[in-house]
Amino acid sequence: MTILDLTTDVLVVGGGPAATWAALKAAEAGADVVLADKGYCGTSGATASGGTGVWYVPPVPEAREKAMASREALGGYLADRRWMGRVLDETYARMNELAEVAKYPFPVGPDGQQLRNGLQGPEYMRRMRIRVRRAGVRILDHSPVVELLTDGTGAVAGAAGYRRQADQRFQVRAGAVVLATGGCAFLSKALGCDVNTGDGALFAAEVGAELSGMEFSTAYGIAPEHTSVTKTAFYNYATFYRADGTVIEGASSQGGRSVIARTLLAEKVFCKLDKAGESDKAAMRLAQPNFFLTFDRLGIDPFTELFSVTLLAEGTVRGTGGIRITDDGCATTVPGLYAAGDAATRELICGGFTGGGSHNAAWAISSGTWAGHSAAGFARSVGAGRRRLIPAGGAGIRPAGSGTVATAEVIEVVRGEVLPYNKNYLRHGDTLTASLGVLNETWSSLREGLHGDGVDLVRARQAAAMVAHARWMYTSALARTETRGMAKRLDFPEVDPAQHHRITSGGLDQVWARPELLASAAVAS
């Protein structure tokens, strides 16, 4: 098999909002940039498949204060107001840039002013791809990265991967690498999330980077049964019912999703968006047209007719955990490596709770911008000299033993320990411990014998990444013996003021988790 060998200043891994902003801003800072996407940049990932709200708040002190205070309690007071302010400033500037430079067609309100607090994913990402290409970025579509490369000092110096359509291996020598690979949804079939298998976190851990907030990974989105669209905000207009038509008390999109989960363990749950007024209905169809496609095809009026629903795991896509950030430029604990978007922890602005869109979209824009600019600066400091490249990949690419482990079996095991509501969503220490034992055994097995070539190598690495992700999640969850943010424990249902800290984690063969004291917390709790 031939090898494509490229050299660049900055390599961006990913193809969603964070990746494209990182590539664009690195190029604007004067860097030569390569972007490698697992899919087709501009169409793959969660944002490209639907619409998203954006945390866009005008620089009015009262409005900014309200915006920052709105989710502090939900997040367990683990967010940092300085970071919130930075993201609000950056998002405001970049959304205005989308309007004025990229000419994004924002809708206009009754006062004639553009409404810049939301984006239609397909159009947004189409324009971002155009902007990236015009900036001179070389895009490698359908080119999943499978491992990072380091130099003799341990600094990240590039990455290697596989070009699906060309059946060709590739490697990119780079002065710096930005991981914008998304979170991990464990192949739950949530819309746009099958590319989100936690690859970036695995790559980062293999070179010694740390993670943070991995216990905040119990995100499940509501979707019509047998579909993939998890536009949970619309279910604020819903009433939830049993098959006999009786209302399920306490069930709701906000604050009552655990009731839905418990009910689903025993019976079907039905729903009707019967709290929406006529003006709401029109606004909903305009904001999220893809939400209604399934209903229109099935001939169901979701506002007047019952339909069955399920919960789809969204892990660290809507959860807040990810690669730990160490400075304002989104550097990690490893020189030359930066993280952005869902691949990076969002605790800095969300604490232990987030949802779809809004803060997530703002974080992708802001962290991508900062990571790209900072990576360009680091690449300049390294210089253009060729460094000796050392491959960093382990599990799934360089097995430690001689056995053979099937990728499909590994995926089946990890999904069996993470997707069920009674294991990951309704967490209890005994269940977490049992699941972690299974996952640890699976890791030991795959570390010995999981491997593949070409497309099979990509799948093997995805399987290894999901198992690693789940182990960090459950190890961190066991370390937090309280309920805070979305990290709820049935055996520890109250907030413990003594645990007002973030939890960092890492390791592969031996996973660890430990508290990180907060230098500046919003409010002590």
Image (cartoon, grey):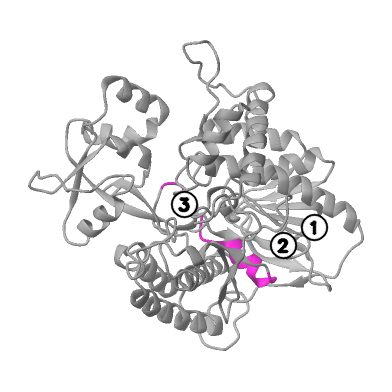
* Residue 504: image tag: none
Label 2: few (<14), some (14–19) or many (≥20) C-alpha neighbours in 10 Å: many
Query: What amino acid does circle 3 point to?
Result: Phe
Viewer-nearest residue: 132 or 203: 203
Is 92 placed left or right of 114 in the picture? right
| Quadrant in the picture for the N terminus | bottom right
- 372 in relation to 455, above or below: above
In the depicted view, which residue is nearer to us: 125 or 425? 425
Q: What range of the chain is rendered magenta?
A: 191-208
Mark 2 → mark 1, Cα distance in angstroms:
8 Å
**Residue type for callout 1:** Ala
Ranked by sequence position, the earlier of labels 2 and 3 is: 2
The answer to if 206 sits in the magenta stretch is yes
Question: Cα distance, mark 2 to mark 3?
Answer: 32 Å
Residue mark closest to the camera, 1 vs 3: 3
Q: Residue furthest top?
A: 111
User: Cβ–Cβ below 8 Å for labels 2 and 1?
Assistant: yes
Residue at mark 2: 159
At x 55% / y 14%, what residue is drawn? 113
Mark before the other along the chain sequence, 1 or 3: 1
Which element is circle 3 on? loop
Q: Secondary structure at mark 1?
A: strand
User: Residue beneath label 1, please?
Assistant: 174
Residue 353's tag is 3
442 with respect to 130 (left or right)? left
Dividing the picture into quadrants, the one containing residue 283 is top left
The residue drawn where x is 36% and y is 68% is 492
